[in-house]
Image: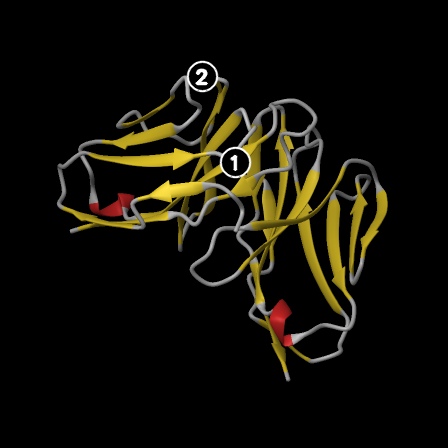
Amino acid sequence: DSGVTQTPKHLITATGQRVTLRCSPRSGDLSVYWYQQSLDQGLQFLIHYYNGEERAKGNILERFSAQQFPDLHSELNLSSLELGDSALYFCASSVDSGTLAYEQYFGPGTRLTVT
Amino acid sequence: QKEVEQDPGPLSVPEGAIVSLNCTYSNSAFQYFMWYRQYSRKGPELLMYTYSSGNKEDGRFTAQVDKSSKYISLFIRDSQPSDSATYLCASNYGQNFVFGPGTRLSVLP
C-alpha cells in the first residue's frame, strides 16, 4: 500500500457527461500528479500541483481540469466525456517538487469507462 | 517518435535467469531516470531512480544509465515468478514526467 488513496475505484458513465476523480496524497506529501493510462498511449502525465498551486501541465485536454485543496487532496474533473477518455487514471504524490519529485508514489487508480 | 522508447515484450524467462530490460530516450534535457514496476490492475511502484551515468544497485536490481548513448537499462538477477509484471522506464525534464510504454515480463517457475 503506497499510502495514496483514490476514489472511486470504478466509474461508468455516458458520453457528454462530467465526472470528478479524487485523490488523497500520502501524509506529508505536498505534490500531486495526475496520469492517464490507456492501452494505446501508455502512461501519460497530465498535470502537477504543489501545495495548492499548478506547477506543470502535460498532455491534458482542455476538457480536463484539476485542483488541489488546502488539505492537499486533489480532484481531476473530466467533462464532455468521449469514448476515447476511457482509461485508468492514476494519482501520484511526492514530498516536494524539487529534487525529490522523481520519487513518486502511485495510488491504485480509477478505472473510467465511457459508454 | 516517442521521447522514451521501450520494447513492449512480452519477455518470458525461466526462474533464476538474469533479465535485461532496456529503454532509449531522445531528449537530452532529461534529468532523472526511474524504473517502475506495475502489477496487473495496480498502480506503478517505484523501484529505482538514478541521476548520473553509471550503475546503481539495490538488492537483485541494477539500474544503468548511459547518457552519451541515451540508453537506460534495468537488470534483475535471480529472477523470481513474483517479478512477473510490466516494467516502465521514465524520466523527467523539470516537472514534466515521461514514461515508456512498458515491457511485460513473465518469469516462469
Would you call the spot at circle 2 few (<14 residues within 10 Å), some (14-19), or many (20 or more)? some
Query: Could you say which is closer to the camera, residue B91 or residue A9?
Result: A9
What count of labels does the image hold?
2
| x 27%, y 46%: residue | A84
Name of the residue lying farthest toward the right:
B54
Which mark identifies residue B71? Answer: none
| x 77%, y 71%: residue | B18
Please give the chain letter of the residue carrying mark 1.
Answer: A
Mark nearest the camera among 1 and 2 is 1
Amino acid marked by disc 1: Arg
Q: Residue A19's quadrant in the figure?
A: top left
Horizontal arrangement in the rendering, residue B90 relative to residue B73 (left or right):
left
Q: Which residue is mark 1?
A: A26
In the rendered view of the protein, which quadrant contains the C terminus of chain B? bottom right
Return the disc, 1 or 2, that comes first in the chain's sequence. 1
Q: Which residue is mark 2?
A: A52
In the rendered view of the protein, which quadrant contains the N terminus of chain B? top right
Horizontal arrangement in the rendering, residue B58 relative to residue B29 (left or right):
right
**Is A12 drawn above or below residue B3 in the view shown?**
below
Q: Position of residue A14 (x, y in %)?
A: 13, 45
Query: Could you say which is closer to the camera, residue B93 or residue A18?
Result: A18
Q: SS of the residue at dot 2?
A: loop
